[in-house]
Every structure is written in C-alpha cells, then in structure tokens.
Image (cartoon, rainbow, N blue to C red):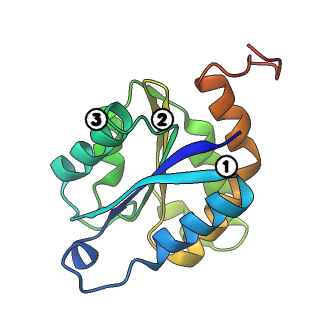
Amino acid sequence: MRWKVAILTASDAGSRGEREDTSAQVIRELIEEEMNGEIIEYRIVPDEKDEIMAGLIEMTDYFKADLILTTGGTGLAVRDVTPEATLSVIDREAPGFAEAMRMSSLQKTRRAMLSRAVSGIRGKTLIINLPGSPKGVSENLSAIMDQLPHALAILTGREGDHGREA
C-alpha cells in the first residue's frame, strides 16, 4: 500500500533560504524506504503560527495527505509554535505517537523532555510533529515507523481497528 505523505518544515532561516533543509531529506528517505510512502507535497514556512496552520490545512484538505510530518518548532524557544499550530487544526489528538517518541528519545538524552511535539488527526490525515534536527528526526520517526502503516490503514478506512480489512 502506498501512502501519501506531506512534509512541512517550520524554520525562519530555512524559509529565507539561509539554511538547507536536511531534516526534510531524512524524512523523505525514511518514508520512501521504510514505509513505501510517496511525498506529495513539501514546503518550508517561517515559524509563524498562521503560516504553519495554513500549510497543514492545505496539505489535508486540498492535497489529501494520509500523513503530514512536520519538522522544527517543537522546543521551548519563543518562536517554536508548531505544536500550537497543530493543535489549532486537528479534530482529535493522537498522543501515543508523541509520547512514544519522547520515551524513546529519553533513553538517548535527558533533553528529550524539552520536546513539546504533538500528534493528532484532521479528517483522515494523521499529523505528527518531529524535531528540527536531522538526528532527532531520524530517531523519533524510527521510534514510531512500525506503527504508522497500521494507524493510517485504520484512519483511512482500509483496515479495521484489529487489523482486519474494512
């Protein structure tokens, strides 16, 4: 099964072209290689709540992504507003993904507790916030990768809650 995946990077420097978006490249590689996903949309926006929200809404409502992975803006800095933007556009939270990522990361660094990443559902799209660093993206996405296909199958109605075809 091929999943439609969108990537949204929240980065002031990246949106101005001052920094290469290597975190999105890590997401792309992991999604294509580990999950048979197709990247259908990618964009970089500044760390502005309204712009992040607009990108998430367009990726769900227009591009019909099954999964949106954000990178950046999940820390404690004043401009880190990705979690707030995500919470503003989702219909329901799906906290297990963010919890699993934090638990996994805490085994590597105590700084993982500073992550404010959230995960939730808008319509039939799963939205998950990832950290901004390539290493953080790789570690966090790897921590949940094995559960994403099943979660997406349930969310999109391709499979029942217990793994049976719907």
The number of discs equals 3
Identify the secondary structure beneath mark 3. Answer: helix
Q: Which residue is mark 1?
A: 100
Q: Which residue is mark 2?
A: 120
| Screen quadrant of the N terminus | top right
| Screen quadrant of the C terminus | top right
Say which quarter of the image contains residue 44.
bottom left
Q: CA distance from mark 2 to mark 1?
A: 14 Å
Residue 163: % across, % down = 82, 23
Residue 57: % across, % down = 29, 37
Q: CA distance from mark 2 to mark 3?
A: 10 Å
Residue 88: which disc? Answer: 3
Residue found at x 40% / y 77%: 21
Residue found at x 83% / y 18%: 164
- Outermost residue on the top side: it is 166
Of tags 2 and 1, the one toward the viewer is: 2
Say whether disc 2 or disc 1 marks the residue closer to the N-terminus: 1
